[in-house]
Image: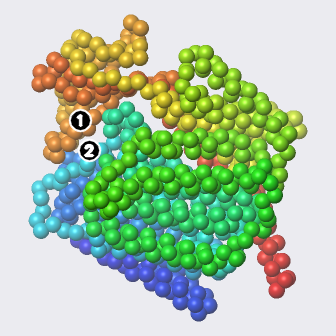
Amino acid sequence: MISDIGLLAAWFALIGSVVAVLLALYGYWASDAKWITSARRAAISVWPLLTVAVLAIEYALLTDDFSLNYVASVSSREQPLLLKMTALWGGQDGSILFWAWLMATFAFVVLLRRWDQDRDLLPHVIVVTMGTLAFFIALDIFASNPFKKLDFMPVDGRGLNPLLRHPGMVIHPPLLYLGFVGFVIPYAFAMAALVTRRSDAHWIRLTRRWTLIAWLFLSLGLLLGGRWAYDVLGWGGYWAWDPVENAAFMPWLVGTAFLHSVQIQEKRGMLKIWNMVLIILTYGMVIFGTFITLSGVIDSVHAFARSAVGPAFFGFIAVTSVASVWMLLRRLDDLRSDNRLESIFSREAVFLFNNLLFMTLTFSVFVGTVFPMVSELVTGEKRTVGPPWFDRVTAPQFGLLVLLMGIAPLFAWRKQSLQRLGRSLWLPFVIALGAVVMLFVSGTRSAGALLAFWIVTFVGVTTLWEYARGVVARRRVQGESWPVAFWRLTGRNRRRYGGYLIHLGVVCMAIGIIGTEMFQQQTQGTVAVGESLELGGFEIRYNGLINRRGADDLAIVEADLTLSRNGKELRGLLPRREIYQNSGQTMTIPATRSTLTEDYYVILAGWDDAGRLATFKTYLNPLINWLWFGGLVFVVGTMVAVWPDAEAERRAMARQAFTRRQVAQAA
């Protein structure tokens, strides 16, 4: 059977990854390139083997092969074709296989590159990537086997969890997994650099695009996860500091710090130890995040059920952490900075403070996330900390980070004149102060909200001003039109100006977060047909219930509402409940009326048997759509920064060739 072929392919993939590790270690120990070449071939073979395993599971899902326990648990005959395909990551067993396949894909592409100039790094990159891959393949085969067969074949399967049938969940898990596995690549090169004592920035330049791609996918995954929560979970928000949300957020925090910090090593030969620590932590948080999601050790709407994979994950995290720290400590002398910090008023100092803030933020989120586990181990009773605790602890740190994001580009390398810095800051400061005064006059009295809006306005104006200065200077020198100057300025330095776009995206997202966190209104009430419920100047009139059938085993109950404002009818709204009859599970799908200034968000909370009475929960979410718009700007900025720059790559290759000639002459 196809499933037997898939299991056999998974076994061969496991053997291939282990063989690749052993051959690479022996080739390095014996200084024999032939063994390393064989290790590379063995590692490359893992991806096609895992592809066969993935295709076998997909075939079983598409053909309703309910003899496999996994297919019976996540699919059904009436399930739509797209959902059958995406059920690959709809359960724990398939998710681990999918994670391993994505990891193999990244490793496959990396190992296919030309290694002529970096042969010394190759065996260690193979050991890290294939070692990580071997763990996940072994986990899938021995602890969470998607090819496990049932003693009997049921007529139909249970179907996919209703929470996973939303379009956002079709692409949200793959994006998160791509972000997770992508960070394994820079970690592998970092470990290779430590082993080979290559303490320069070469490994950073080799992996910069891989890091940005991983960061982009992880960012997209977080954004889509927030949108899914907003659209499906029916609680009026997008982020609840859920353990699995936090588990994906922590590697993003440390990875963001790493992306900023490596610039100092490239420019000034500083923060080498910081960069190693940050990429080790990012890798550790990736494995920890996968552990939290797949083990079920912490209760979450996003996590899978409790399983036996937890101890294996814990052991792997312990082994890799100890090995990484041990190697780092052995190479501390090699990682001494080429230059010293000359002034606290310098870009280097700002980036160092940036690292510290990201670390304290990550630590804060980590403590709140693992507290339930620790409390259960110590007291036998599971205790949790809720969103209010996270908000109080992290909000000041996020505020400082955003402020630092705005002023960092204004600092010069080595030392910054305070007088010159003041000339750059006074105009954004005054504009931001004017915006705060206008908000105060218009009725905003919250000191926290006014401070937050001052920060985002100041940072937004500062970033736009930096962009504008570059466009004006280019237009004056080159005589180009405004659009051409803007386009060519961005193209000449994609990394810098892509970063500015990312910062503007963060500013827009911060506006949306401030609006919803500080000014959200909500109410709940039960009304009869023809009666209304009011909130924030809006009014909904209940017109009755609508019952209809959906796809698969879905029954839908909709409330027919009319939304008005100040007596003027705006539109109809249809909040609904989706009831999956086979499983008895229910989904609450809100209805929204969205504008640039706010979302009116209504949930059908309940109704009587005849539908004469219905209960609704309504939210008014100011500025929420700035969050989603900012996310789009953020993604565009990242793509600009990632986009290949042929001229920059030629300069980098020339620098590398020059360095190699110098080394050869010295030898």
Q: Quadrant of the N terminus?
A: bottom left
Question: Would residue 440 be found to the left or right of residue 161 on screen?
Answer: right
x%, y% of residue 45? 46, 76
Q: Which residue is mark 1?
A: 578
Circle 1 — which element? Answer: strand
Say which residue appears at 58% left-offset and 52% top-offset: 358
Camera-side residue of 61 and 166 = 166
Looking at the image, do the residues carrying marks 2 and 1 touch, with CB atoms under 8 Å apart?
Answer: yes
Q: Which mark identifies residue 500?
A: none
Mark 2 and mark 1: Cα distance apart in space? 9 Å
Question: Would residue 596 be found to the left or right of residue 607 on screen?
Answer: right
Say which residue appears at 33% left-offset and 66% top-offset: 310
Q: Amino acid at mark 2?
A: Pro
Say which residue appears at 80% left-offset and 80% top-offset: 663
Say which residue appears at 42% left-offset and 51% top-offset: 368
Circle 2 — which element? Answer: helix
Camera-side residue of 226 and 137 = 226
Q: Quadrant of residue 444?
A: top right
Residue 89 in view here: no
Residue 539 in view here: yes
Camera-side residue of 88 and 191 = 191
Of all residues, the one furthest to the bottom in this rendering is 30
Q: Which residue is mark 2?
A: 162
Q: Amino acid at mark 1?
A: Glu
